Image (cartoon, helix red, strand yellow):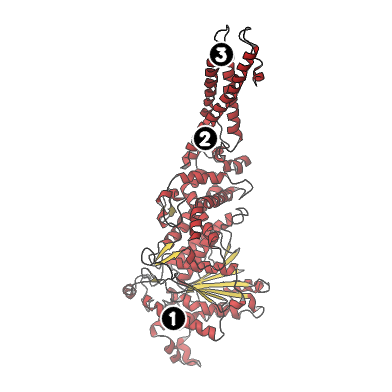
């Protein structure tokens, strides 16, 4: 069984990427997720919470209902910490009002064997009195002290729940896999990774080798202005205190890596796989100390990190690779991208098990389906004439009309709304941010095809590819491929799907038609691009 | 091959039987040619109509599709057959009494009907001519 633990703002964004990969059918069969962040109102977290909530609804409708050939929404996501509504709730080792002073019982240290001067040596006065409800503000020393106390929480959810499930899995030969994702240049992620890995290792006496722990350590890939940091913008007017400074990121990263090197050389290495991912291009983000205003755009580094996590779950490393640290950076033998920045193309993805063509074509098919749904088929299946002239849509005639079924029920329309909202409000806006990262020239898909949604009544911020770009969704943009005739070709593909393929009823039957047609469409329309890519 | 047209009697008893049979051989050959020409024309026009019907929006999916008029091109077989029958008869048996109008019209009609029936079968029965996206559409008012 697989558990993804995401710590801090960057960790939440890795979770966001992982969920999108699961939606596209690349995830493991089951994925437990735990979000950790002392900054409860973090804007990054809010976005992920909405995504997870939406994904879980989609999985209930579509998972295992799309036929054998399609695994979209195929990962059963289990949320370990959830609120009353069942939504993802963040876990924190500290309360909103807690200060380090309270956690280490600073005022009473004099009555113990530990002199208060030791605490003074390790922490500044600002750090000792910092309210921790807004996170550790880029100070991993504070966070490490609190995460080191995780054992105090092991009898309470979500840890009791997780440890209970894990102990059952440790009796099985397949064991339990845990992947920790977070930055090592900030506060929460940097301070959580090692204490949590150590904590988990210490919980099991029997079959210890069956616990596999993977890590994705994000190294700096964004920065904010030191001037903005000084003014302390964001955070809802909470006292400034010590703030994260991006000019300290490199120093913090170096210190963290030296610490990991120390662990490795002293045989105190609790990890089975470590991937270090970053981007020297450095995306500029607006400064926000914490809170809802800390809402950074998605970045391809988080996508790479999520790929590492998924590969870890699907292909756990051998014990002989235990001390192998993988890292990914830009290729050295290529020109810089168009913007004079790092270039990210498909061959740059640090894949160890996924086949690049399968990943690319699978994601492309998901893109094509989303684009076709938003730009064409959603309007077809909601058309007033659908049940009057069902013979005009042969797959609908076969799968619905012949069985006296329809997609015009309240339930089916609600299910259709789910995929509309998923693609339009989550998937494509996320890709738009990944592709638009100013710090790199991302050449995965065609960012010129993504634009604000044109669908009537769409939500703010909704995004969708141009429907006439259905055969022009991969990089680079080619204007001659931009034509509305692609709709006809895609429609032709959708009617070629045999009735024994895909889902058999309801919105799942519809989504499976979209997907199977998209795979045919990609195999034909993108074949040339794929072959020329192989040649190069 | 002329025996296919055994039911067509000599228009004048004085016409030499060998000549008449040779005439019927040519006419029956042309009947086949006219039917095939009519069939080809119908299928070509049908294919053009099908290819011209592009779906570019949701409304296009439900737009009426009326390729049945292509079948009217069977009249080409009628015209070809009629023109040849009368021209060839006149050229060959001008000096004899009798008329080939009735039989010529019947042969022309047969050519048109055969072209129509074969084309209808091809359109309705084979995916080569009718893409699967139209397979459940009615030929008229589909």
Q: Position of residue B67 (x, y in %)?
A: 52, 31
Figure quadrant of residue B28: top right
Q: Quadrant of the N terminus of chain A?
A: bottom right
* Residue at image mark 2: B47
* Residue at image mark 3: B92
Q: Earlier in the sequence, mark 3 or mark 2?
A: 2
Could one spot residue A450 in this view of the protein?
no
Where disc 2 sits, the SS reads helix
Q: Name which residue lies at 50% across and 50% down.
A: A525
* Residue at image mark 1: A254
Q: Position of residue A419 (x, y in %)?
A: 51, 53
Up-down relation of residue B140 to residue A230 (above or below): above
Q: Name which residue lies at 44% across and 53% down.
A: A464
Q: Position of residue A74 (x, y in %)?
A: 58, 59
Where disc 3 sits, the SS reads helix
Q: Residues within 10 Å of mark 2 (few under 14, many from 20)?
A: some
State the mark number for residue A404: none
């Amino acid at each position: 069984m697989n558990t993804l633990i995401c710590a801090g703002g960057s960790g939440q964004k890795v979770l966001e990427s992982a969920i999108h990969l699961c939606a596209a059918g690349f995830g493991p069969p089951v994925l437990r997720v735990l979000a950790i962040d002392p900054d409860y109102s973090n804007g990054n977290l809010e976005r992920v919470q909405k995504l997870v909530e939406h994904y879980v609804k989609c999985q209930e409708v579509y998972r295992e209902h799309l036929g054998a050939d399609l695994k979209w929404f195929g990962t059963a996501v289990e949320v370990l910490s959830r609120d009353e509504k069942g939504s993802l709730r963040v876990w924190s080792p500290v309360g909103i009002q807690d200060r380090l002073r309270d956690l280490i019982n600073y005022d009473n240290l004099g009555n113990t064997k530990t002199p208060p001067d030791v605490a003074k040596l390790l922490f500044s006065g600002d750090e000792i009195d910092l309210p921790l409800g807004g996170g550790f503000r880029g100070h991993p020393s504070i966070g490490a002290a609190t995460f080191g106390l995780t054992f105090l929480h092991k009898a309470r959810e979500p840890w009791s729940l997780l440890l209970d499930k894990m102990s059952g899995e440790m009796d099985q030969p397949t064991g339990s896999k845990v992947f920790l994702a977070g930055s090592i240049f900030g506060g929460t992620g940097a301070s959580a990774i090692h204490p949590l890995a150590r904590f988990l290792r210490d919980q099991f006496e029997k079959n210890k080798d069956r616990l596999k722990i993977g890590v994705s350590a994000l190294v700096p890939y964004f920065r904010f202005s030191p001037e903005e940091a000084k003014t302390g913008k964001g955070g809802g007017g909470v006292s400034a205190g010590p703030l994260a400074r991006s000019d300290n990121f490199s120093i913090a990263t170096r210190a963290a890596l030296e610490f990991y090197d120390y662990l490795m050389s002293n045989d105190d290495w609790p990890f089975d796989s470590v991937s270090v991912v970053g981007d020297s291009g450095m995306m500029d983000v607006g400064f926000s100390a914490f809170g809802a205003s800390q809402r950074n755009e998605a970045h391809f580094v988080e996508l790479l990190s999520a790929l590492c996590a998924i590969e870890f779950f699907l292909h756990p490393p051998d014990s002989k690779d235990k001390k192998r640290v993988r890292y990914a950076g830009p290729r050295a033998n290529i020109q810089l991208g168009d913007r004079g920045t790092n270039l990210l193309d498909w061959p740059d993805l640090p894949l160890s098990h996924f086949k690049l063509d399968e990943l690319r074509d699978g994601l492309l098919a998901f893109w094509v389906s989303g684009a076709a749904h938003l730009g064409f088929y959603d309007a077809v299946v909601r058309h007033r004439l659908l049940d009057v002239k069902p013979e005009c849509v042969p797959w609908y005639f076969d799968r619905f009309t012949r069985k006296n079924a329809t997609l015009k029920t309240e339930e089916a329309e609600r299910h259709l709304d789910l995929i509309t909202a998923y693609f339009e409000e989550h998937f494509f806006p996320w890709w738009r941010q990944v592709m638009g990262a100013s710090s790199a020239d991302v050449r995965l898909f065609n960012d010129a095809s993504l634009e604000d949604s044109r669908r009537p009544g769409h939500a703010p911020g909704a995004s969708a590819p141009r429907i006439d770009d259905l055969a022009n969704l991969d990089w680079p943009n080619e204007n001659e491929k931009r034509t509305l005739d692609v709709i006809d070709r895609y429609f032709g593909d959708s009617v070629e799907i045999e009735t024994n393929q895909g889902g058999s009823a309801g919105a799942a039957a519809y989504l499976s038609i979209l997907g199977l047609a998209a795979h045919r469409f990609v195999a034909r329309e993108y074949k040339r691009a794929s072959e020329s890519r192989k040649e190069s | 091959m002329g025996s296919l047209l055994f039911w067509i009697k000599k228009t004048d008893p004085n016409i030499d039987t060998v000549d008449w049979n040779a005439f019927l051989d040519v006419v029956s050959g042309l009947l086949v040619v006219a039917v095939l020409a009519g069939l080809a024309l119908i299928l070509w026009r049908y294919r053009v109509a099908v290819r011209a019907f592009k779906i570019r929006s949701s409304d296009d999916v439900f737009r009426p599709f009326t390729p049945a008029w292509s079948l009217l091109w069977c009249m080409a077989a009628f015209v070809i057959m009629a023109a040849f029958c009368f021209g060839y008869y006149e050229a060959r048996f001008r000096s004899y009494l009798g008329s080939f109008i009735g039989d010529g019209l019947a042969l022309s009609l047969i050519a048109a009907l055969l072209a129509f029936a074969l084309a209808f079968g091809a359109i309705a029965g084979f995916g080569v001519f009718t893409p699967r996206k139209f397979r459940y559409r009615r030929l008229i008012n589909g």
